[in-house]
Amino acid sequence: MLQNKFNIPAGAYISALQRNRVDYVVTVPDWVQLALHCQLQAGVEGIELVQCCNEDQAVCVAAGLSIGGKNPVLIVQNQGIYGCVNSIRALGLDAQQPLVFMVGQFGREFSNFGKSPNLSRRNTVRYLEPVLDALDVRHWCLEDESDLPKIDQAFSYAQRTSRPTALIVGAPTGWL
Amino acid sequence: MNILTACQAIQEARGHAILIATMGAMVAFDKLNAGQPRLNSVPLMGGSASLGMGLALAHPDRIIIVVDGDASLLMQLGALVTVMGKSPGNFHHFLISNGTQFSGLSNLPLPGRQIDYCALAAAAGYPITHRIQDEKNLTMRIEDILSSHGPSFTDLIIEPDPPIFGPNSPQQDWSDHQFTRMGDEARQLATWLASRGAA
């Protein structure tokens, strides 16, 4: 099977971003979310794409947009979160910006889909949730389409609390 | 030129431009009582250019002045490329080039020597670069720089202030303000911008 229920269609993510009035996607590309990247790169009405050289810069650009009254989302992968912890601390937590991350679980074994990432053999996958927990960044896992309402919850929580949140994209976004 | 005279020239020409500073420039603008619209990347070395770029995209109608430090920029050198990815015309990037870390505190040397920051900015695609060595030239050129269509990059050659730390004057505790001011300033700036309805 080329795609299965774990591959939430990229179009469903786009709809969720539009529903949550996202106007900027700030990103360092993620292997897991390539189908979503390709749709965004092709152009989505109302959403401007900002590509950054690394995730520290992405966090800062998104914070500047947020302070300026815009509603960005960050698309990165798990390694990117590990790389920009200090920027999350500074701008998400200290400066209390409502930054919403979509974080791909790069390296997750396909056999692990639908199971706990804690059972992964790979540190890259297994450490993501503990790192977010250590930073007190609330997170939601997106495993199949029934989880899509969690995207709305994450945006709502970020705005209500002025805190960063993370949506963990568990499997490659669907191309169809 | 020292950091205070350089920042004073920027402050005097700034008008209502949004000012993003970090490290030594932040301290200098504090001494100059620089007010809104203003935000500091603190404590966060390397964040000012990307923060400024986000604001430049959100408010293309406003001039954005970033006053970066050389040690800070070296931590996020790729930010020059990130900025040029969108090439905001309202973005003006100044660099406090004093060749030191903890400048005016312990003046530790940077890892590199004779770094050509204008060449780095130009290689990243900045269409306008300047290197200014003295206050007179800065004062004379600052208005032209700020009225130009950017992004512009201006390397300010700064003589470091003498170090103040040593055996008879060790470090003192930081005030909490150093760790809360970015959040306070972000809220104040967001309110200032929203009250003008430009977002």
Image (cartoon, rainbow, N blue to C red):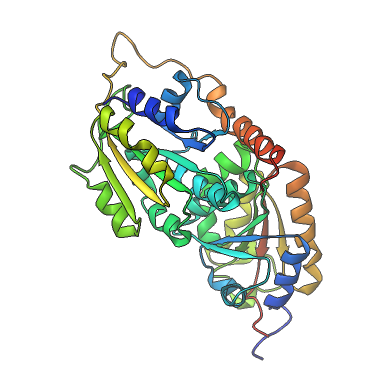
Q: Residue A123: in sight, yes or no? A: no
Look at the image and tell me in which quarter the N terminus of chain B lies: top left
Name, please, the residue furthest toward the top.
B168
Q: How many marks?
A: 0
Q: Position of residue B32 (x, y in %)?
A: 45, 20
Name which residue lies at 37% across and 42% down: B144
Name which residue lies at 65% across and 67% down: A169
Nearer to us in this view, B21 or B135: B135
Q: Residue B94: in sight, yes or no? A: yes
Name, please, the residue furthest toward the left.
B114
Q: Is residue A124 above or below residue B167?
A: below
Name, please, the residue furthest toward the bottom.
A1
Q: Position of residue A146 (x, y in %)?
A: 81, 71
Q: Is residue A70 toward the left or the right of residue A124 in the image? A: right
Nearer to us in this view, B57 or A118: B57
Q: Is residue B48 above or below residue B174?
A: below
